[in-house]
Amino acid sequence: MKRRNLLAALMAGAVSFGLAGCSQEPESASTDADSSAQSNNSEQAAAPAEQKQTYKWKMVTTWPKNFPGLGTGPERLADNVREMTDGQIDITVYGAGDLVPALEVFSAVSQGTAEIGHGAGYYWKGKIPAAQFFSTVPFGLTAQEYNGWMFHGGGLELYREAYEPFGVIPWPGGNTGVQMGGWFNKEINSVEDLQGLKMRIPGIGGDVLEKAGGTPVNLPGGEIFTALQTGTIDATEWVGPYNDLAFGLHQIADYYYYPGWHEPGTALEMIINADAYNKLPEHLQAILDVAIREMNADMLAEFTARNNEALRELVEEKNVELRRFPDDVINRLRNMSEETVKALAEKDEMAGKAYDSYKSFRDKVVPYTQISEQTYVEIREPEGEAAPAQQ
């Protein structure tokens, strides 16, 4: 009993002492606490300032400012990155010719004139022959297959290896899907009709045209209308109905041919100066990566949605004469393309590596595409019912 009374007394005393300590805290302790709180507040105030360092970047593009799809995509990316980084990365977008000429985008990013650029790899084939494989190959991968190669088939690693010597980091930055064959002022009934033809057509497709006896001309989009109107070129390809309508190409050409054998799934690219990218904190690098991947997917979705509407307008309202390339022309071009691509791979070591990887993936993916996508498209419509463009 005495022991329980003693324990009770000790507990009561401890409680009493604790209450007294809480209500009568020494003045010096209060001062120390205030100082500590002020110090913590100062550190917290300083931390956001350090984290909020901003990076003002310039983006140059090969497209006219705000051009549908190709030009609006970079603007959307800049807006998304600005919002996702809470303003830490602030990108100003310049259209073709606003800061540098359209076909100087790669050099501008490589040299640091601009931190980021948007274009297409085949425009700089003179610097990097392998770049054409990362853009489009005649009779090659579709957009869906290309993305498979890029992100899950080793393509992206080779892409970056090819650009590394120039201090540039590339990403797939959008895709047009299968393009149209182009605008012509004469009928194409045989491969002989391509002989002597001056046509705006870039990349490997241009080399194939040259093999067929034509003359490829590499022009930025903003110069195409005038070149075709004045007779500097006889024919042109650009992208597809959505973009071709915006350029008004139906006003100066008689025939609109399909399919785009030369560009079956053209990938655009976002390129970033390596020094500028490496200066970013890792979380901002991650945001850029995600934003560019989103842009890559969204641009293809936009072209898929808009091309149909634009084609109907061209055919039904603008009275454009839609033509399909004859089978014998397609077959000859396919053979010439195979020879041209092989020759390119043999001339340049990096192009050879890209070709081996590209061809290996194509050989693996095409059989499944044939039994899935291709077969489905063939059976989707009732037998004998043609698509509107073929009627």
Image (spheres, rainbow, N blue to C red):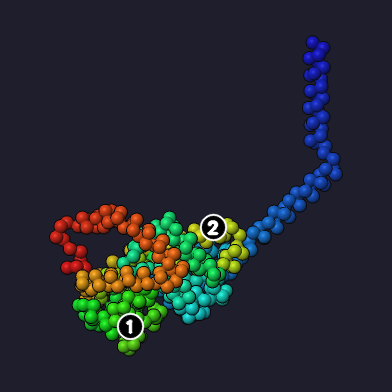
The quadrant holding residue 254 is bottom left
Q: Which amino acid does label 2 sit on?
A: Ala
- Where is residue 287 shown, x and y percent of the image? 53, 59
- Where is residue 374 shown, x and y percent of the image? 26, 57
In this figure, which residue is indicated by the disc labeled 2? Answer: 286
Q: Which amino acid does label 1 sit on?
A: Thr
For the image, the number of numbered tags is: 2
* 343 horizontally vs 23: left or right: left
* 46 horizontally vs 145: left or right: right
**Label 2 close to label 1 by CB (< 8 Å):** no
Residue occupying the point 46% across, 61% down: 156
Disc 2 crowd rating (10 Å Cα; few below 14, some 14-19, many 20+) is: few
User: Residue 28, can we see it?
Assistant: yes
218 or 279, nearer to the observer: 218
Residue occupying the point 29% across, 55% down: 367
The quadrant holding residue 285 is bottom right
247 or 205, nearer to the observer: 205
Q: What element carries label 1?
A: strand
28 or 230, nearer to the observer: 230
- Where is residue 166 shown, x and y percent of the image? 54, 71
263 or 300, nearer to the observer: 263
- Where is residue 338 shown, x and y percent of the image? 32, 69
Residue occupying the point 25% across, 72% down: 332
In this figure, which residue is indicated by the disc labeled 1? Answer: 215
